[in-house]
Image (cartoon, rainbow, N blue to C red):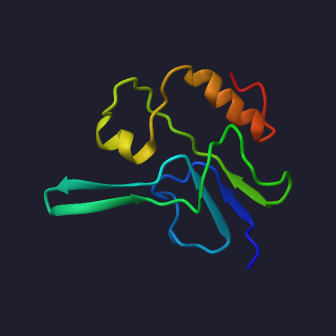
Amino acid sequence: MEKKVLDVCCGPKGMWFDKQDERALYLDRRCETHKNNYPSGYKEMEIKPDIIGDFTNIQQPDNSFSLVVFDPPHIKRSETNAGEIGKRYGKLNGEWKDMLQKGFAELGLVNYF
């Protein structure tokens, strides 16, 4: 099946009903598993993209997807540990405005800052 959707910051695929949807190619810079301690017990959160990559430099050919999903990290933290939210959504470190601007430009979107 040809992939129609590119999710460039998939994280734990929280926006997906079917986290193994074969129409999508999942990209993230992280591949990791976290155990979260909930009152009901431990639950694993898995960040397992198809491709390890950076949304500011996407290696897939231009115009090869019908839809690109871009939900970049949106937690501004410089600390190593940003808690469960940071684990789920990723963190913006360093020059984060420049990083997001490069991501928008890579996707053909400009002037968002």
The picture places residue 22, in percent across and down from the top left corner, at 63, 75
The picture places residue 74, in percent across and down from the top left corner, at 49, 34
Quarter assignment of residue 89: top left
In the image, farthest residue toward the right: 63
Closer to the camera, 42 or 58? Answer: 58
Closer to the camera, 27 or 40? Answer: 27
Closer to the camera, 47 or 65? Answer: 47
Identify the residue at horizontal 64%, vertical 46% (top origin). Answer: 70
User: Quadrant of the image for the C terminus?
Assistant: top right
Identify the residue at horizontal 29%, vertical 38% (top origin). Answer: 83
Instruction: Locate residue 43 relative to residue 96 in the image: left or right.
Output: left
Closer to the camera, 12 or 51? Answer: 51
Instruction: Locate residue 44 relative to residue 29 in the image: left or right.
Output: left
The picture places residue 100, in percent across and down from the top left corner, at 63, 30
Instruction: Locate residue 40 relative to residue 80 in the image: left or right.
Output: left
Compared with residue 78, is residue 10 higher up or lower down, i.e. above or below?
A: below
In the image, farthest residue toward the bottom: 1
The picture places residue 39, in percent across and down from the top left corner, at 13, 57
Compared with residue 45, is residue 75 higher up or lower down, i.e. above or below?
A: above
Quarter assignment of residue 72: top right
Identify the residue at horizontal 44%, vertical 32% (top origin). Answer: 75
Identify the residue at horizontal 77%, vertical 33% (top origin). Answer: 105
Quarter assignment of residue 106: top right
User: Quadrant of the image for the N terminus?
Assistant: bottom right
Compared with residue 30, is residue 95 higher up or lower down, i.e. above or below?
A: above
What is the tally of numbered marks visible in this picture? 0
